[in-house]
Image: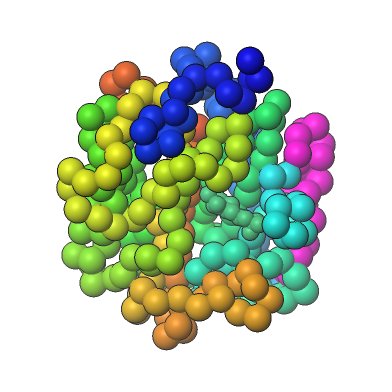
Amino acid sequence: MDERNKGRLTKDGIRIYQPGDFAGMQAAGDLAAGILDQIAPLVEPGVTTGSIDDAITRMVEDAGATSATIGYKGYQHASCISVNHVVCHGIPGEKRLKDGDILNVDVTVIVDGWFGDTSRMYVAGKLSRKAERLIQVTHDALFKGIEAVKPGNTFGDIGHAIQSFVEAQRMSVVRDFCGHGLGRVFHAPPNVLHYGRPGTGAVLEPGMFFTIEPMVNLGRPETKVLSDEWTAVTRDKSLSAQYEHSVGVTETGVEIFTLSPAGKFHPTWV
Ligand code: MF3
Ligand code: CO
Ligand code: CO
């Protein structure tokens, strides 16, 4: 049997991976997260997002790994860099960061066929109070979602944990983009919604691998995609933030594959 067809699919089409597959995901996750650690000192006012992406491309190459995003549906960069009101899929380029800009850097690598997908927030220069609050809430929302990951819970439980937390802070959860199954492929079932009702959706089982990647806006949740066909922005131009981890369901709970090797996941820890 082809390696990628091992294990089984649930009735919702979600692949159940084997215990031995966790190590492959951990190696891919370690590389992606280590790259996000290493770019932290590069993020400064005056720097272009393209130069940060160039550094990421080099780190992926130096590790003997492959970028999952270069060539993906015509995308040409090793990262997405989403500044201020860009929600996700920002294209790195010649734009220079300004003091106080906040940005999400999203990296996906392939190591020995396994995909590691993670993103974090960074700040160029001085972090404003309102941006700090947005980033903190988004970070904590991701972890509310991760805390809901255990066998027997549902994907609706994850979405509900995130949505209820975010909305209690008077911020909004983006509906137009979601997390996804991954493993030996980049995007697979299920769609991991960051909103929802408890007890709804597929039931979590050990061996499921997926991302949780909530996007949170200070204003309204609506987004639009710019004419470059990638860049998604908030319709009301409010600030947006995102964090992403790749996780696996274990017999007792969750394993996070993309924890920072240097313990640097939060921007104020850099
Ligand atoms: N890494 C993104 C995700 O979290 C996907 C980026 S696809 C790209 O799913 F082509 F825009 F890079
Ligand atoms: Co993802
Ligand atoms: Co990603």
Q: Position of residue 108 (x, y in %)?
A: 63, 45
Image point (21%, 46%), residue name: 200
Image point (34%, 65%), residue name: 173
Quadrant where the N terminus is found in the figure: top right
For this orientation, the residue located farthest to the bottom is 236
Image point (36%, 74%), residue name: 221
Horizontal relation, residue 55 to residue 210: left or right: right
Between 168 and 7, the residue placed more toward the observer is 7
In magenta stretch: residue 255 = no
- Range drawn in magenta: 47-66
Q: Is residue 135 visible?
A: no
In magenta stretch: residue 62 = yes
**SS majority, magenta:** helix
Q: Position of residue 178 (x, y in %)?
A: 43, 56
Q: Position of residue 45 (x, y in %)?
A: 66, 72
Between 154 and 263, the residue placed more toward the observer is 154
The relative height of residue 31 versus residue 46 in the rendered view (above or below) is above
